[in-house]
Amino acid sequence: MITTDLKTYGIGDRVEDFELPDVDGNPVRLSDVTGPWTLLYFITTWCPYCTAEAPFLESDLVARFTDRGLRLVVIDVKEPAGVARALPERFGWTSPFLVDESGVVSERFAPHKEGLAPEVAIINAHLLLDQDNVLRFAEYLNMERFDIHASSVGAAIEVLIGGGTDD
């Protein structure tokens, strides 16, 4: 977990509301799609780590915590909507899928990585926001420890969200 490399937001910071279009060009405000807990996931079509993890993101990770209020918001970084559209279609995602074609929003979440542009450093990042949009967890791509099932993300969510219901 990295807490000091965020360009704008660090653990404990409240994330300001923002608006991005979905793949159809409809404006979507973050505040309109968040839940008690919101997992922001940053992706591109050309990232092999993103597309490897993608099939499991909603079906495994998010499904595991839906009953505890977890919502997923996917943000495509610096690609046009026509290109980005392939991802939610390919993986059958139903979660909000937003397009940050300019990279301005994504850059505010990107860690400082020497030699990497912010739009590359943020790819395959998982950021967990609480009900007040306070950043509670951030994990960035580590190619040496990459886990297709994002087990470390799931473990952190389990700790932060706490026990489930016994229905």
Image: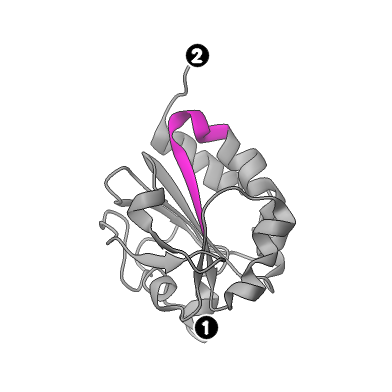
| Identity, as a three-letter code, of the amino acid under mark 1 | Leu
What residue do we see at 42% from left, 61% from top? 2
Q: How many marks can you see?
A: 2
Circle on res. 166? 2
Residue at 45% over, 30% down: 68
What is the x, y in percent for residue 24?
55, 66
Above or below — where is 113 with respect to 11?
below
Q: Position of residue 159 (x, y in %)?
A: 43, 35
Q: Position of residue 69 (x, y in %)?
A: 43, 34
Query: Given this view, does label 2 or label 1 mark the residue nearer the observer?
Result: 2
Q: Nearer the viewer, residue 103 or 159?
A: 103
Q: Please report whichever mark, 2 or 1, sits nearer to the chain's N-terminal start.
A: 1
**Between residues 107 and 159, which one lies in front from this camera angle?**
107
Judge whether 3 appears above or below 112 on screen: above
Q: Is residue 116 magenta?
A: no
As helix, strand or loop, the secondary structure at mark 2 comes to loop
Judged from the image, the secondary structure of the residue bearing numbered disc 1 is loop
